[in-house]
Every structure is written in C-alpha cells, then in structure tokens.
Image: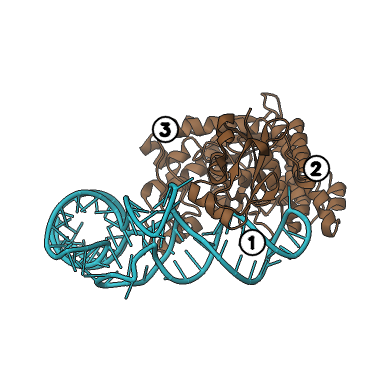
Chain colours: A brown, B cyan
Amino acid sequence: MPELKSDFLRDIVGRGFMRQCTDLEALDEEAAGGTVVAYIGYDCTAPSLHVGHMVSIMLLRRMQRAGHKPIVLMGGGTTKVGDPSGKDETRRLLPDARIAANMAGIRESFESYLAFGDDETGAVVVDNDEWLSELTYIPFLRDIGRHFTINRMLAMDSVRLRLDREQPLTFLEFNYMVLQGYDFVELFRRYGCTLQMGGSDQWGNIVNGVELGRRVAGARLFGLTTPLIATASGAKMGKTAEGAVWLDPGMCSPWDYWQFWRNTEDGDVGRFLRLFTDLPLDETARLEALEGAEVNEAKKVLANEATALLHGPEAAEAAAETARRTFEEGGAADGLPSVAVARSRLGEGLLLFEALREAGLAPSNAEARRLIRGGGARVNGVPVSDEFHKVTTADLDADGGVRLSAGKKRHVLLRAP
RNA sequence: GGAGGGAUGCCUGAGCGGUUAAAAGGGGCGGGCUGUAAACCCGUUGGCUAUGCCUACGGUGGUUCGAAUCCACCUCCCUCCA
C-alpha cells in the first residue's frame, strides 16, 4: 500500500477499519487537502444500535477527530422499503410510528461518540425520509431510474442471492438500492458530502451511489467499507446469551456491556483494542503482546475503555470494581444487578428455584430447577444441588443481600430490606 | 383465473393413525479442564413443587377407542401455467 498522506486514512487503515475503497489515493488526496464530509446510513429496524454497529460508529468518531465532518443518516425512508442485502426473506414492514421511535433511540447512542454541531466538523443527523417521501414517481424514474440498468441490478449480490434460491424479491425491495444511491446524491447536494462508508455488505449499494452521483451531479464521490467483524472462532460478533449487546443502557446495562468486552476471546484482543478504543497504537501493541493469563489485563483495559466511551468513565470504573469484587474476591458487590424481594418471604424460606426465576437468572421454574440439578446454581458462592433448597434470612449479609449465581458469570444480588 | 407443493419445538429438519413432549443437527444453558479465553469432553434443552397433570406439530371443525399423522373448510407461503 502506498504511503498515505492524510491523517484520517492513515489512522483508520492502520487500525483495521478499511476493507475496500473505491479510490484510495484520490480520497487520500481530498482528506489531506481539507475537510471531507462523509456519511454512514443506519437502518431503523430496532430501537437501539448494538455492538455489531460499533465498527462504523468508531469509524465516524475517528473521522471527526481527524478533522472531518460525519453525517449520521437515519434510514427513516429506506426502512420503509427494506434492504434485501443479506436476507433471504422479505423483511416485515414496520409501522411508521415504530420507525420514528427507533430512530430516536438510535440517535441517543451517538451522543456518546460524536460531537454534534453546525460547525465545520460538527456531526449532524439526517433522516432520508425527508427527501424520499417527497419523491414523485415519474420524475424520479426519469431523472434517476434511467441511470440504473436492470442488467446491473440483477447482477447485484443482494438480488442474485434471492433469485438463485428462488426466494421472492418484491419490487419494493428491488428499489432499495436505487433509493440508497439517491441518498448519496442528495447528501452531496445538501452537505457537499463526498464519501459514503459502511459495512462490506453495503459495497454494492455504495458503489451504486458513487456512480449515480457522477452521472447526475457530475460529482466525484468515494466509497469505503469496513470489514465484517467475526470473532476469532468465527462467530458473528456481538451476540451473547441474552441476544444482541445493545448500546442503549436500558436494554443492556453498563455492567453487562463491560462484561461483554471482558469476555473477548484471546485472539481478538489486539484487533478489538484498535477498533473499539481510542488508545494509541503503541499502547494497543503493548497490550496485545501480553501472553497467557496476562491477556486478562488487556481485556480489562478493553472493557474499561469501551464502556467508558459509551456509558462514561464512572460507569466503567464501577463495572470494573464490581467485577473485581465478584470474580477476584468472590464477594457480593454492590454494582451487580439487583432484585428486591419481600423479607417476609425469606422468613418462611424462599425456594431457590423461585428466587432464581425472580432474579431473572432463569426464565421459568423448570429451567431454574434444571440449573440446580445440573450443579450450576449457587447461593453466596456456595453450590447448591438440592432442588428444593430454600433461601432464608440466614443467607442475608449485613446489608440484607444474598448473591445468587447461575453458572460462573451470571450473578444477581437478591435484596430483602 | 387454473394446476401442484408446503406450514412441526429457538432455528434447520425427520415423522405421515397408537411405543411421540415429538428423531437428527445447529444454537442456548449448565458441569469438567482453564485465565470470567479458545478448543475439547459430559449433561441438559415446553410448562407446572411432578411417580402425575397441563399445553404443543398454521387455524377451525370432523372421522376414530386413539390424530402432528386421515377428511373438510379457512389463513399464509412457494412453484408452474394463463
């Protein structure tokens, strides 16, 4: 790879953010010479973003810190259509109110990563519904539609996959790529945006936008994609027992978020430090070089840094401290998720399986009982295998709490004040 | 509009009158080994304080001592023809 001139590209290439770029040298030239305006689009299908979106969020962050202007494009309009990429089934359509609510939740998360404002490098949020819902059919077909050939559209991966598998692809979805391409043109016109970034599965859509911009606006646009992040053992990143690791603290507590990063596989630590923290590269290299059990130190740094970015340094510190007390000392720490229960119920002796269920450690009594039978249940760190064991006031510590555990990692503090 | 095919547990997918809470795999959860890692091995995987009861094979009725399995209608999906 030739020597890069711009801080922005040197930084993100060095940290592993880039998979493909439509014209790296020319983009480097632009970025070295002035402020680049770039965007990434986000679907509004869920009420929050999750860890799977972190690469692109961090990319926008690094870009802004390198002196450029990020645009967060909310797909309020395109979500009404549905992206066929990577899906072999038609996506169900969401009601408009849900889309709007989702958008609000997503926006929230960005506050932690980007500095919003109208100045030269201030981040902005735009909703493509603004222009997409204004479109009128015939003029749109004449101005934009004529630049797309069915031949090329049929060759797109997202389309071919469906057709090859003989799955239906509706005309509505078929239009997604046209609309996404149009977004780029619109952002170029409104904000002088010349770069679209996204996951590598968006490459086709991004290239369409670049091409369209050249044809209808004579613009020189760029596209850049990030690699798909899988874990070292090949699993898709960002899923845990409870499902996706959400960014919204209401959907995934700072404690769980910290734990997610703490549980990173050894082989991923270096890469994740580079992608998901702001630590300088010499520091990440030092941490990555740690061997054996020492990598745990690197994982803690990763968890601290990643959590601090999203939830703030205090939340990260609290999670780290709770983890230290819970795992390294085996005690009941304050920061654990806690559930309150009436003290009188402990007086009579509360069945452990019911307590586990109420604490959210098991979805049903039957599951809780299986957990106990399997030897995975603990009260204050002591394994209990009696299915009908009762938790009593004698189990309470001085503050009126009992620590219930399901397995080695999931702990809840049951409080009976 | 016509002809055929399909809908099974978290997912894929077998079963095609009783021995089926439903094969197999995946995933999940737990245990062991470890370092709150990976890999591997083992157990478990509808609900209910349970030698039992309830709910379950798209929906509603029916045939039968007995249905996920047979019949009718309905809903949704797919393929082909017009």
Mark 3 touching mark 2, by CB under 8 A? Answer: no
Q: Chain of mark 1?
A: A
Q: Is residue A191 above or below residue A356?
A: above
Q: Is residue B14 left or right of residue A356?
A: left
Q: Residue beneath label 1, please?
A: A234
Gap in angstroms between the C-alphas marked 1 and 3: 36 Å
Residue, x 49% and y 51% (percent of image)? A366
Check chain identity for marks 1 and 3: say if they share one: yes
Q: In the orientation shown, which residue stands out farthest toward the front?
A: A348
Give SS at disc 2.
Answer: helix
The quadrant in which the N terminus of chain A is found is bottom right
Q: Looking at the image, is mark 1 or mark 2 nearer the viewer?
A: 1
Instruction: In the rendered structure, find residue A96 and report the number of the disc placed on it.
Output: 3
Instruction: In the rendered structure, find residue A359 and report the number of the disc placed on it.
Output: none
Residue, x 67% and y 57% (percent of image)? A231
Mark 1 touching mark 3, by CB under 8 A? Answer: no
- Residue A286 in view: yes
Q: Is residue A155 left or right of residue A34?
A: left
Residue A254 spot, x, y in % from top left: 67, 37
Please state which of residues A18 and B17 is positioned toward the viewer in this rendering: B17
Q: Residue beneath label 2, please?
A: A7
Residue, x 58% and y 43% (percent of image)? A390
Q: Looking at the image, is mark 1 or mark 3 nearer the viewer?
A: 1
Please state which of residues A305 and B59 is positioned toward the viewer in this rendering: B59
Q: Chain of mark 3?
A: A
Q: Amino acid at mark 2?
A: Asp
Q: Residues within 10 Å of mark 2 (few under 14, many from 20)?
A: some
